[in-house]
Amino acid sequence: AMTATTSTLRWSEEEPPVTISTGHEFDQALHKVAARCTTEHPIIVALYVHDYEVGIGLGLPESFVNIKSWEHGTPESCLITVGNDRAQRGADFFFLDKHHTEIPRRNLIPTAQARQIVREFFETGSRSTSVKWEEL
C-alpha cells in the first residue's frame, strides 16, 4: 500500500497553507481556490509534495503545470508542460494570488488535464507521460 502523503498547498502569501493528504482533499482545495478566481485574476497555486514544488494555474479554461525540484535550497530543475498550441494566446496568472506571471501560449494545456497531471503526481510522485515537458 502507498504510504499517505502529507503535502501542503499554498494559494496566497497572506493565508496559511492547506494540508492535504488525500486526492479528495486535493480536489476540494483546488475547487475552493478556483471558486475565488476571476478571469481577470486567475491564480497559480503551489503544491509542496514528494520534495517538489508543483505549480498549477486555476481560473481559466487553459492552464499549465510546472514541477520544480530543489537541491540544497536552490532550484535544481524546473519543468513545464508543453501544450498543443490550441490556446489562442498566452495567459496571465498571479502566483500565490499576488505576483503577475505570464505563461506563454506554447505551455498551456486544458485546465482539466492540468489538474489530472497534478493529482497523478500527488498520488504517485511520477511525472505524467500524457503530456510533453520542457526545461524552464
Image (cartoon, rainbow, N blue to C red):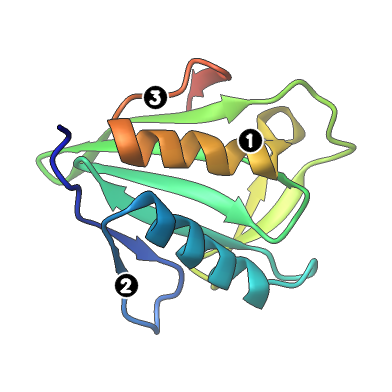
Q: For the residues marked 3 and 2, what is the alpha-carbon distance in whole angstroms?
A: 23 Å
Q: Where residue 7 sits in the image (x, y, percent)?
A: 25, 55
Residue 99 visible? The answer is no
Q: CA distance from mark 1 to mark 3?
A: 13 Å
Q: Residue furthest bottom?
A: 14
Which numbered mark, 2 or 1, is in the foreground of this view? 1
| Element at label 2 | loop
Image position of 129 (left or right of 85): left
Residue lying at 40% horizontally and 84% vertically, measured from the top left: 14
Mark 2 is surrounded, within 10 Å at the Cα level, by few (under 14), some (14 to 19) or many (20 or more) other residues, namely some
Give how far across and how far down residue 52 sits, in percent.
Answer: 27, 41
Q: Residue at x 58, y 65 (%)?
A: 31
| In the rendered image, the vertical position of residue 38 relative to residue 5, given as above or below | below
Disc on the earlier residue, 2 or 1: 2
The kind of residue on which mark 1 rests is Gln
Lower position in the chain sequence, tag 3 or tag 2: 2
Q: Is residue 4 left or right of residue 95?
A: left
Q: Residue at x 46, y 23 (%)?
A: 128
Whole-percent x, y for residue 114 in the image: 59, 39
Q: Amino acid at mark 2?
A: Pro
List the residue tagged with mark 3: 127
- Residue linked to disc 1: 113
Secondary structure beneath label 1: helix
Pointer 2 residue: 17
The image quarter containing residue 87 is: top right
Q: Helix or strand or loop: what does disc 3 sit on?
A: loop
Q: Given the image, on which type of amino acid does mark 3 rest?
A: Arg
Q: Is residue 104 above or below residue 22?
A: above
